[in-house]
């Protein structure tokens, strides 16, 4: 089994770069599909979650498919999305923005990295497929609770690719996700109530375009969930964690202590289990992924870890709550989320080193309570 992790950082400028946090590790053979009847199940009260990430790959437990001509097709729990990766190299699909959010791989071959100061060679993460699986994957017979909110629906919004992404694309993606008109882009027919942004990049303050998009999302009643980041740094200088009005999620290990790589700081709202594969790959979070090294190949199951996984858990929990009560306001849902946290054993996540929010998500209790 191959184990690797990518937490490279990129310079922040006019088009500040943000990065995905961790790669899928230890791919397993694909389990049998049990996708029958997904389409009819739970159309009622399905909470829509926008996953702003690397896009989505074909997977029977999610429903996204690839047509013979190579384009993506929604299905199962995955609704139509959009691809906001403006840089053609980053996008690896031959152009800039387009209507197909299929993940073409964020892996960079060694020869491609030679002349690039902005990124290093790495294999593809399939990060968007990992996150979508944690929130909504179907797999009723093999693993009943693989996706936390299997009745929710995913809108894949692609904003990350090879060598990362930029905040202008992320801001456009957030606006589109909540149903705002973005120039030259068709309206999102399924506005999201939860926006999962499992990424973080260094920035001394929240870029204005990003804050404006987040403010608009909140005005429309959506909840923006962001990862604290996985570079063991203070969130005061990580974005979108340092934006106002965001639910920021840190990662803890099985013992409820801050995962060594998780960022920390006063911006963190709460922590959730993010897995700790240093103590064994099976201590990661099991989810949907792909076997491709650089380009997508076959659907698979695998483990990942980090505050990305922790944020996905929180988005899944919020989707579950939203699905139970479609009348609840964003504030009520977040209050309900925070009511299902346990305090850190020592009062803080790592005994005074840093702040990891008001407690650790108790997912089991939250699920029982819904
Ligand atoms: Ca494109
Ligand atoms: Ca595309």
Image: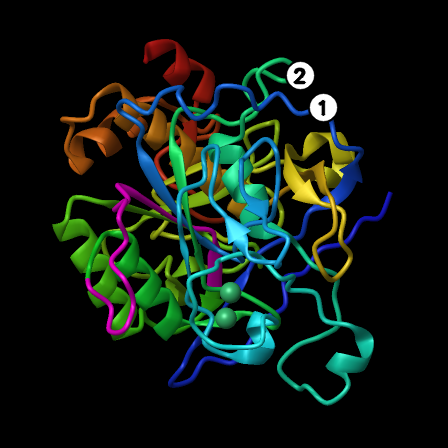
Q: CA distance from mark 2 to mark 1?
A: 8 Å
Determine contact: label 2, label 1, CB under 8 Å: yes
Asked if one can make out residue 350 in the rendered structure from this viewpoint, the answer is no
Give the side of residue 187 with respect to residue 128, left or right. left
Residue located at (77% from left, 85% from top): 114
Q: Nearer the viewer, residue 201 or 39?
A: 39
Q: Nearer the viewer, residue 266 or 104?
A: 104
| Residue 165 image offset from top left, x and y in percent | 49, 71
> Within the magenta stretch, is there residue 23?
no
Give the side of residue 139 with respect to residue 24, left or right. left
Residues packed near mark 2 inside 10 Å, few (<14), some (14 to 19) or many (20 plus): few
Quadrant (top left, top right, bottom left, bottom right) of the C terminus = top left
| Residue 223 in which image quadrant | top left
| Residue 54 image offset from top left, x and y in percent | 54, 58
Magenta portion: prevailing SS class: loop
Quadrant (top left, top right, bottom left, bottom right) of the N terminus = top right
Residue located at (29% from left, 67% from top): 185
| Residue 275 image offset from top left, x and y in percent | 62, 36
| Residue 276 in which image quadrant | top right
Q: Tell me: residue 324, above or below residue 212.
A: above
Q: Nearer the viewer, mark 2 or mark 1?
A: 1
Residue located at (52% from left, 47% from top): 308
Give the side of residue 44 with respect to residue 296, left or right. left
Say the numbered circle drawn on residue 142. Answer: 2
Say the numbered circle drawn on residue 32. Answer: 1
| Residue 148 image offset from top left, x and y in percent | 47, 26
Task: State the extent of the magenta-drawn residues as a range.
Answer: 181-200
Q: Nearer the viewer, residue 207 or 51?
A: 51
| Residue 206 in which image quadrant | bottom left
Query: How many numbered badges does the structure rendering display?
Result: 2
Q: Secondary structure at mark 2?
A: loop
């Amino acid at each position: 089994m191959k184990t690797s992790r990518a937490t490279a950082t990129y310079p922040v400028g006019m088009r500040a770069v943000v990065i995905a946090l961790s790669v899928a590790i230890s791919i397993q053979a694909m389990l049998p599909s049990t996708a029958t009847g997904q389409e009819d199940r739970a159309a009622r009260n399905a909470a829509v979650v926008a996953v702003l990430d690397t896009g989505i790959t074909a997977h029977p437990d999610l429903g996204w498919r690839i047509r013979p001509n190579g384009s993506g097709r929604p299905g199962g729990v995955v609704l139509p999305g959009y691809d906001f990766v403006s840089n053609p190299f980053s996008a690896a699909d031959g152009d800039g923005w387009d209507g197909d959010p299929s993940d073409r791989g964020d892996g960079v071959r060694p020869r491609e990295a030679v002349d690039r100061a902005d990124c290093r060679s790495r294999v593809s993460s399939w990060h968007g497929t990992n996150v979508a699986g944690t929130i909504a994957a179907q797999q009723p017979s093999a693993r009943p609770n693989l996706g936390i909110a299997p009745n929710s629906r995913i809108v894949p919004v692609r904003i990350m690719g090879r060598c990362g992404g930029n905040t202008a694309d992320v801001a456009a993606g957030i606006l589109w996700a909540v149903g705002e008109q973005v120039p030259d882009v068709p309206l999102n027919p399924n506005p999201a109530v939860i926006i999962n942004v499992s990424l973080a990049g260094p920035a001394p303050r929240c870029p204005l375009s990003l804050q404006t998009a987040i403010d608009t999302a909140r005005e429309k009643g959506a909840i923006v969930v962001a990862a604290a980041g996985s570079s063991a740094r203070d969130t005061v200088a990580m974005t979108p964690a340092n934006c106002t009005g965001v639910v920021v999620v840190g990662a803890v290990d099985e013992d409820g202590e801050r995962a060594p790589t998780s960022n920390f700081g006063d911006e963190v709202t709460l922590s959730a289990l993010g897995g700790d594969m240093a103590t064994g790959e099976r201590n990661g979070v099991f989810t949907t992924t792909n076997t491709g090294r650089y380009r997508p190949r076959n659907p698979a199951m695998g483990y990942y870890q980090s505050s990305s996984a922790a944020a996905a858990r929180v988005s899944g929990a919020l989707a579950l709550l939203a699905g139970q009560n479609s009348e609840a306001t964003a504030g009520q849902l977040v209050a309900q989320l925070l009511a299902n946290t346990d305090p850190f054993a020592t009062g803080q996540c790592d005994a005074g080193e840093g702040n990891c929010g008001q407690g650790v998500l108790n997912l089991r209790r939250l699920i029982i309570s819904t």
